[in-house]
Each structure stands twice: as C-alpha cells, then as structure tokens.
Image: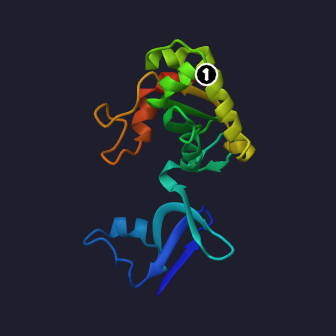
Amino acid sequence: GSQVKIAEDGEILIKGKHVFQGYLNNAEETAKTLDKDNWLHSGDLGHLDSENYLSITGRKKNLIITAGGENIAPEMIENKLKSIGGLEHAVVIGDQRKYLSALITLSPEAFSISKEIGSSASSAEEISKCKKFNEYMQNQVSAINTQMARVQTIKKFSILSSDFSEETGELTPTQKTKRNVILSKYADEVEKLY
C-alpha cells in the first residue's frame, strides 16, 4: 500500500495509508508537506534504480546550487571525503560559487599520518599548516575527484586547526554538522577559498 516516486527536482515523494493526514490545526505546514494529490514531500533527495531500489543521496535543504546552475547534494561528496585517513569532518561549500570547496577537520589519525610522511608537526594547528600534510591531503582529494562528475569535484580545501564539536556549536547532539553555523563561523576561511 505504499507508493514512492521521485519528483523532477530529485525529492523523494511518498504516498499511502501510513502517511499522516496533516499537522493538527496547521494548514500552512500541511500544505508545505503534503501536495494536493496527498504525496508527502520528504525533504530527502534520491533515485530509484532499474530494480526500483531507493537510494537516498542527500537532503533538499542542503542542496548546493552552483553559479553555473548545477544542483549538488553535498552529503555524498562529504562521505567520500571522510574516508580519507586523518580527516574527521568535511563540509562541502559552493552555493552560488563557480566551483566546490571544502572545510575539513583532522582526526587523531592525522598525527600518525603526519609522522609517517616525515612531518614534525605536533599539534592540529601545526599539521593544518604543514606543507607535506597538505600535499598528502591534496593527493587524497584528487583521487576522490576522479570518482565524481566534474561539477562535483573539490577544487580547493582548507584544513581547520580545530575539530567541530557539540560544545562549540558546529555539531548536533547526534554528531551531524550544522552547515549554517559552520559557514557563518568560518566565513573568512570560506572567502579565502574563492
């Protein structure tokens, strides 16, 4: 009894008896969530494959629209970047910009990688400024870029000297990044990338 379809903008729509009828005494919010045909607009982006398996690729509210008009879900790119050894968090940026960039933070593994590549850096701040470590990170990012479409590639990145945390306001209690907080807090770093 459940139906799923993908809207023209990539949003996942759901319909069925299991979908709620609307918000109690809030017609305005109901109209934002349920369309006239009772399709629930989930806010998630995704696609159905040839066997009708659903893949969720991101959140509509996080969609980056580049200066060239390309719609890019940053979560997929961020997850690929997080696979890099020594990298803890990644936030892809590029809304209304000519290309994508990323703000990244270091994991504890960055210290051992730094030593392995011959760096004497002993703090996150020193590692973030270390030429050898930046070259290592650039090689890793370049390798990931080969797996993506040209418009999805990261052209520049900035290694931040401190990690994101719930206490400093960049992470939610479930450890998800607060994109707007990070973009505001690190606005100067973002501008240096463009």
Callout 1 crowding tier (Cα within 10 Å): few <14, some 14–19, many ≥20? some
Q: Is residue 27 above or below residue 1?
A: above
From the top left corner, tell me how far across and down residue 103 is, in percent: 52, 31
Q: Nearer the viewer, residue 63 or 132?
A: 132
Q: Is residue 31 above or below residue 120?
A: below
Q: Is residue 71 above or below residue 127?
A: below
Q: To which quarter of the image does residue 108 belong?
A: top left
Q: What residue is drawn where x is 40% and y is 45%?
A: 176
Q: What residue is drawn where x is 59% and y is 28%?
A: 157
Pointer 1 residue? 134
From the top left corner, tell me how far across and down residue 132 is, in percent: 62, 17
Position of the C terminus by quadrant? top right
From the top left corner, tell me how far across and down residue 111 is, in percent: 48, 23
Q: Secondary structure at mark 1?
A: helix
Residue lying furthest top in this view? 120
Left/right of residue 173 with respect to residue 136 in the rendered view? left
Residue 78 in view in this figure: yes
Q: Nearer the viewer, residue 175 or 98?
A: 175
Left/right of residue 31 with respect to residue 154 in the rendered view? left
Q: Amino acid at mark 1?
A: Asn
Instruction: Please tell me how many numbered marks the rendered image carries.
Output: 1
Q: How is the image coloured?
A: rainbow
Q: What residue is drawn where x is 67% and y is 44%?
A: 152
From the top left corner, tell me how far across and down residue 93 is, in percent: 56, 37
Residue 99 in view in this figure: no
Q: What residue is drawn where x is 51% and y is 71%?
A: 13
Q: To which quarter of the image does residue 115 belong?
A: top right
Residue lying furthest left in this view? 25
